Amino acid sequence: MKMKKRFLALSLALAMCLAMLTGCGGGNDAATDDGGSTDDAAPGTPEVTWVASCANADDHPAVQGVHKFAELVEEKSGGRMHIDVFANAQLASDRDCIEGMQMNTIQSGIMVSSALAGFTDELLVFDLPFLFENSAQGQAVCDSDVGQQILGTLEDIGIKGLGWMEYGMRNITNSVRPIEKPEDLQGIKIRTMENPIHMAAFQVMGADPTPMAFGELFTALQQGTIDAQENPLSVITSSRFNEVQDYLSMTEHVYSAAPLMVSKAAYDALPDDLKAIVDEAGVEACQWEREYLAEVEVQWLDELETAGTQINYPDKAPFVDAMSSVYNQFVGDGDDMVSPELLEQVREIISQVE
């Protein structure tokens, strides 16, 4: 982790140097401090243009949330600011999006907090299995002072968090058998994110966790390279995984929070009035996305069942017991660990949610 953080520091320093050199260069297309491209603004054209990158399909609720963010920014700025939204990893993978925001070649992005493992440790608390029973508990933590403090740690890596969207609770799909108990995962090759907690959680149940880029996942499932994957319903449905997977097991083992992010360099270069507009639009877009997700989740389950997916609701207690050792492995002091104090604060907030 320390090497990663040193690398990030060097990357940010390089980005600043490149930005200064670019600002001194000539050319007809002005390379502006705001991070997007602006020609000498003609009447009726945006003063600032940003690009936003999303790895998921365009109809994914969080991607729709980014579209809403872009719409609100343009509306509230009276057209002075425009954001182009690219879905389906057309512009960048999650990791490339993070690095792009650090370098200010990408100005905005959305992804699950799990994708930020290795960049900032504070977000790892969301990856602890069965810490959250439902999305309401996750939202309560995100909306608390603790959640805002976690969001604020993104500034240490050159990114500004505007608010929390969500992908929902993570569940397992596979083409081998229904997952009724932890033993049913024995020998199943399951795609996970490149996240140490996710990988350890499936290893302790006897599965074979296999990190893989999201863009490769559908083909790998289709060809049988892997047997299973785990994601929220929002991803399972928008990515059409039900077309290549027979079983959906509603384990709800992790809550996937999703920070709406912008490049700190791009944000800092905005005039104060546009900063305020970006802040306000970010908060409104996050709330809109949560409400939209809640509306469509029930509908998705009905559609999946109608399409022939076999859905089961396993007893979670055996899974909680099986994954409990993960807490011993990842809660403590040091890099790539969840702070015991932070975990205690999160649990206190959860205990107050009815």
Image (cartoon, rainbow, N blue to C red):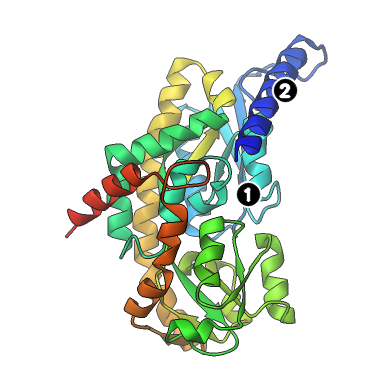
Indicate the quadrant where residue 208 lies. bottom right
Q: Quadrant of the C terminus?
A: bottom left
- Above or below residue 1? Residue 225 is below
Residue hosting label 1:
94
- The one of 63 and 317 positioned closer to us in this rendering: 317
Amino acid on which the number 1 mark rests in the picture:
Asp
Point 70% across, 16% down: residue = 40
Residue 262 appears at what percent x and percent y? 53, 34
Q: Secondary structure at mark 1?
A: helix
Residue 34 placement, left or right of 300: right
Label 1, label 2: how far apart the Cα atoms are: 21 Å
Amino acid on which the number 2 mark rests in the picture:
Leu
Q: Secondary structure at mark 2?
A: helix
Classify 10 Å Cα crowding around label 1: few (below 14), some (14-19), many (20 and above). Answer: many
Q: Quick one: which residue is furthest to the right in this view?
A: 27
Residue 188 appears at what percent x and percent y? 60, 81
- Above or below residue 40? Residue 261 is below
Q: Which mark is residue 14?
A: 2
The answer to whether residue 257 is seen in the rendering is: no
Residue 180 appears at what percent x and percent y? 43, 87
Classify 10 Å Cα crowding around label 2: few (below 14), some (14-19), many (20 and above). Answer: few
- The one of 334 and 77 positioned closer to us in this rendering: 334
- The one of 31 and 249 positioned closer to us in this rendering: 249
Indicate the quadrant where residue 136 lies. bottom left
